[in-house]
Amino acid sequence: MEPNGHTFLEKVLTIVREEQDESRPLIEFKHPKQLEEILDLDVTEGVDDKKLEACVRQVLQHSVKTDRVTFRNQLYGGTDPYGLSGAWLAEAFNTSQYTFEVAPAFTLIELKMIQHILQLFGIPEGDGIFSPGGSMSMFYGIVAARHRAFPEVKAKGMRGLPELVLFTSEDSHYSIKKAAHWLGFGTESIKVVKTNQCGQLIVPELDIAIQREKDAGRCPLFVNATAGTTVLGAIDDLVAVSDVCKKHNVWMHVDACWGGSLILSQKYRNKLNGIERADSISWNPHKMAGAPLQCSVFVVRERGLLHSSNAAAAQYLFHQDKFYDVSYDTGDKSVQCGRKIDAFKLWMMWKARGDSGLSSLCDHTMDIARFCLHTVENKPGFRLVCDNLQCPNVCFWYIPKFMRGRKEDEKWWEVMHKITPKIKELLTLSSRLMVAYSPVRQYKNFFRLAFTFHPIVQEKDVLAMLQAIEECGEQVTLDML
Amino acid sequence: MEPNGHTFLEKVLTIVREEQDESRPLIEFKHPKQLEEILDLDVTEGVDDKKLEACVRQVLQHSVKTDRVTFRNQLYGGTDPYGLSGAWLAEAFNTSQYTFEVAPAFTLIELKMIQHILQLFGIPEGDGIFSPGGSMSMFYGIVAARHRAFPEVKAKGMRGLPELVLFTSEDSHYSIKKAAHWLGFGTESIKVVKTNQCGQLIVPELDIAIQREKDAGRCPLFVNATAGTTVLGAIDDLVAVSDVCKKHNVWMHVDACWGGSLILSQKYRNKLNGIERADSISWNPHKMAGAPLQCSVFVVRERGLLHSSNAAAAQYLFHQDKFYDVSYDTGDKSVQCGRKIDAFKLWMMWKARGDSGLSSLCDHTMDIARFCLHTVENKPGFRLVCDNLQCPNVCFWYIPKFMRGRKEDEKWWEVMHKITPKIKELLTLSSRLMVAYSPVRQYKNFFRLAFTFHPIVQEKDVLAMLQAIEECGEQVTLDML
């Protein structure tokens, strides 16, 4: 008899519980070639359920347990279990979000979530859509800006348009580069504006840069402000950026993919002051807030623009001769055709916790980041990159004892640049901690500990992470580098 | 105490089983405003688990049961339960696919699946990536073609390039329009080539169209052939298209999002002959093959092109100073940053069933479509749009008795154009069948019954669907239209 898989589905929860059990290591690192040897991935011949389970467990055993407090490698981590419940239900109800008829309740949920999010961001009259990730949300922003300024672009393309210019800070996310390429601007159309030491865009420099482009006969189109840069977590001065954008009549987008979750906190949302002036905003609840991947929202101030800039009016899908109000067929606002019902999992989290529950989770996340910052600040051998806590990112170097008290010249920093990755390697191989590192501008490789709503991190966990870094740091010798 | 959601997760399988129980209707249609009244969607205040469960069940009750044989509204339907198991595991292990370190096993799985798929499509030396849907896969194809022809586009944009032209058939999917807009070509750069009655691109017309554009000084860049059009399921003559593309040195893309699943069948894969000559192919296993949404593959013949055309080399993510072979950090081939591990669910389905299991499912799907076609052909009141079964799409009108035997002039067809949506409305409101309808070219609104691997449809199910159409068709009167 053919396997039917229904009984397998019943085992999934057990497999998850066992493979994510705390006794399992965060990571059992194997090099790619080694892992290829271990895993049985070939699919040519079918296998029975028992064998399948063994293969799957092997895959999961060699997968990173992103739900651990010691997983600090990216700007996402564990999921909100209500969000995960929503994700499982969404998968089981396998539904594409384009027309009301096929997704009636899910369509209303997406509309409700967008409305609620628009309220929070202070642009209640706007519109929005869920997209497959922050990069795509950035694309939506640029497309909307371009279409508002030059609606003929839809038919005529970029060839007839003036030379358009996009502005962003040097610490901003690289997705604007991919957007400039894909959307036909070219990466040279991006003007990179300097930031201050903590990663915030220097607004007077933006003003000068826009004026310079205007004077050169080019057309400033789009300013990408960042609320939570990827590495340092910097939040640009959104009020000041808005003033410059208004002065020059340029579209203001806020990439709040990371920092947007602060809007959930009554205590910390003032860090995003000025976001209510944006023309468009992108926010990834799958990052800090713990919605399962992918959950990204794009919102735009001008109602109708999302539709006018993206609609293609496919006859077979968006018929106008249906028997219900087709204004609820929201899919033509999207650049996608089939689209996952990502709003549903966010709705489940929010419905369970309410505004105040999410606010508390956000406050705790910031509190634990502040505890980490203060501990790092006062701990021998640790040095902060920036002592200003904007988002829950804490960035620092660990300086091993043999490096301390020496002249910190270029050569010294070159060694530090190699020490950080080496410590990370030791942390990973010992499965004690997965932590991000990066250089930024003049700063040589340093660590970034970023905190998220889930799993809930305690002060003792932070101390253990720092201790792990210190202990691995003290294992490093010059010969290793 | 704060709700933690872990106990809720344990209930999900029960909720799914109960809400998808066969006793529940396919759809309980409510108009948007009615449904807004019924559902409790507000998220301002949190609710306890019991209340949450009630709200969730209400949402699911008013959601379409896409796992039913009577759900024939789209080109997807029920999921492969092994695929669904994979999707649930993927959600629980919440992992983003960009670097090997964070997704070691999942990275190897994506590579393995792409390799296996490339073999099947006959371009074993190629490369590929999973993308968030067929539209995005189309974008990848155009971007790759443009970058190969004009690598300077990445930096310089579209302004300096010659006038580029994209070719597609009049029955092809609308995503090429969205691509032409977003990517900066403009929709006027698309030249639409006529099809024959069954929806296949007329290849000599393509040849003429390309030559015409050349003669006019424009630059033909990209031909989009279709293997499985959305409505009629037509498969273009890929060998002939390839000859024309080679003659003119134009990129050949095959949009096999729907029909690509025929490659799984030993018996039917010859319908895709010529696909091995394509420069790029898009295929959505989430359509016919029943992978949970989203599961879309883009493959390209020229190895390295996906990386060179998309890479942005973000320092914080794609460091070159890591301790392992960073050629396994495959994420910079993607236009996304964070990306779901969609390959994993496909791998689970394939691992369980093997090549031969998927082949059998495909054969059964085609067999049942052929049974449907022959039944429709011979059933009074039913009329086929096209009697050539290419993909498992069967397209037809139902002509109620009061319309039969009358002169089929323009006015008659205008009435038929209204009858089809009316029958669909009655089918939906009675929850007997959700079926697609559409006009195509000169053909007025007709039904499309398309078949997928899951759930497995039996001949008796087909007969019941046709009977439902007939019975609802006979309820239609002229007053209703």
Image (cartoon, coloured by chain):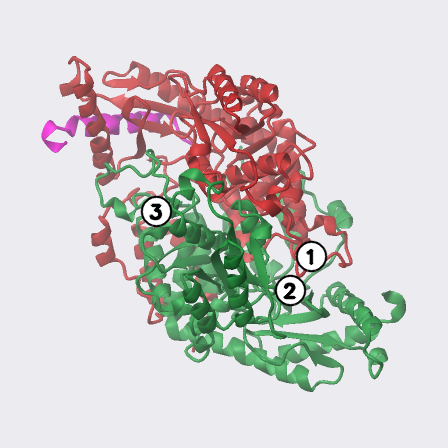
Chain colours: A green, B red
Numbered mark located on residue B82 in the image: none
In which quarter of the view is residue A102 placed? top left
- Categorize mark 1 by other alpha carbons within 10 Å: few (<14), some (14-19), many (20+): many
Q: Nearer the viewer, mark 3 or mark 1?
A: 3
Which region shows up in magenta?
A: B454-481
Q: Is residue B22 left or right of residue A241?
A: left
Depth check: give the residue in front, B399 or A112: A112
Q: What amino acid type is highlighted by mark number 1?
A: Glu
On the image, the x and y values in percent for residue B420 come to 23, 28
Q: Which mark is residue A308?
A: 3
Q: On the image, which quarter does residue B231 sit in?
A: top left
Q: Give x and y (percent) for residue A366.
A: 53, 77
Residue at position x 81%, y 78% from top? A408
Examine the rendered structure and indicate whether residue A271 appears above or below residue A303.
below
Q: Secondary structure at mark 2?
A: loop
Image quadrant occupied by the C terminus of chain A: bottom right
Q: Amino acid at mark 2?
A: Asn
Q: Earlier in the sequence, mark 2 or mark 3?
A: 2
Whether the residues at callouts 3 and 1 have beta carbons within 8 Å, the answer is no
* Tag 1–tag 2 contact (CB < 8 Å): yes
Against B341, residue A400 (above or below) is: below
Which class describes the residues within 10 Å of circle 2: few (<14), some (14-19), or many (20+)? many
Q: Is residue B469 left or right of residue B285?
A: left
For the image, the number of numbered tags is 3
- What chain letter is assigned to the residue under label 2? A
